[in-house]
Amino acid sequence: MSTVPPPETTTQTVRRVQPRSQRPAGGPLWLGPAIGCMTGACAVLALGLLIVFHPFQGGEVVQVPLVVVTVTPTRVVPTATLRPTVVPSPTLAPTATPEGLFVGGEAMVSGTGSTLRLRSDPGLQATTLKTVADGTRLKILEGSREADGLRWWRLQDQTDGAEGWAAETYLTPAP
């Protein structure tokens, strides 16, 4: 049989903390330097206030000259003030309404024999978006542009808001 040695034991010293009432008198170590710094700051502040509010009296006294301003009233004589004359502004003569087709005006479809095509772009090869019958009133939005030997205007059908380009040949100014 083998024998197992007993475990080693270590001894530790336990320090007990004394209650505050049984400790020797005295404060924390940082308290002394803190009080010293605060005392020094108060001394510097007091010295600064003394210098600001009670300046040193030098050997020579400087006298500041006293300036006295005297105002003598003068009599003001009123003078007549001219009133502006009212000049009537010239009236503008009424401008003549542009003749023919113009942007912002209206056009009537006429001379097609049946309907006029509103196209996606100026030109005979552009896609037809809508057809409108003779006698339809259209608002002119843009123009005029030349394409395929014709003059084109961008128009809007007031009934449904559809827009497209149409040849001037089939348009007359709306009365």
Image: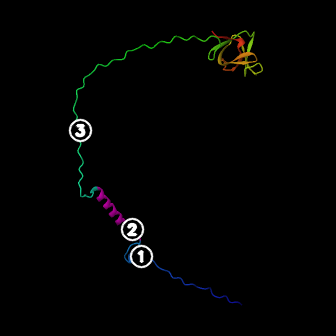
Q: Amino acid at mark 1?
A: Pro
User: Residue at image x 39%, y 68%?
Assistant: 34
Q: Which residues are magenta?
A: 30-52
Q: Position of residue 89 (x, y in %)?
A: 45, 14
Compare residues 16 and 151 and report the one nearer the observer.
151
Q: Residue at x 31, y 61 (%)?
A: 47
| Amino acid of disc 2 | Ala
Q: Position of residue 15 (x, y in %)?
A: 48, 80
Q: Who comes first in sequence, dot 2 or dot 3? A: 2
Identify the residue position indicated by label 2 in the image.
Answer: 34
Assess disc 2: are there few (<14), some (14-19) or many (≥20) residues with their C-alpha within 10 Å of its C-alpha: few
Q: Quadrant of residue 167?
A: top right
Q: What residue is disc 1 on?
A: 19
Q: Does the residue at mark 1 contact the one at mark 3 (Cβ under 8 Å)? A: no
Q: Quick check: 98 above or below 22?
A: above
48 magenta-colored: yes
Judged left or right of residue 76, residue 169 is right
Q: Amino acid at mark 3?
A: Val
Which of labels 1 and 3 is toward the front?
Answer: 3
Residue 40's quadrant in the figure? bottom left
What residue sits 36% from the left and 63% below the top? 41
Majority secondary structure in the magenta region? helix
Instruction: Return the residue nearer the eye: 119 or 81.
Output: 81
Residue placed under numbered mark 3 in the picture = 69
**Label 2 – label 3 distance at C-alpha:** 58 Å
Residue displayed at 74% across by 13% down: 115
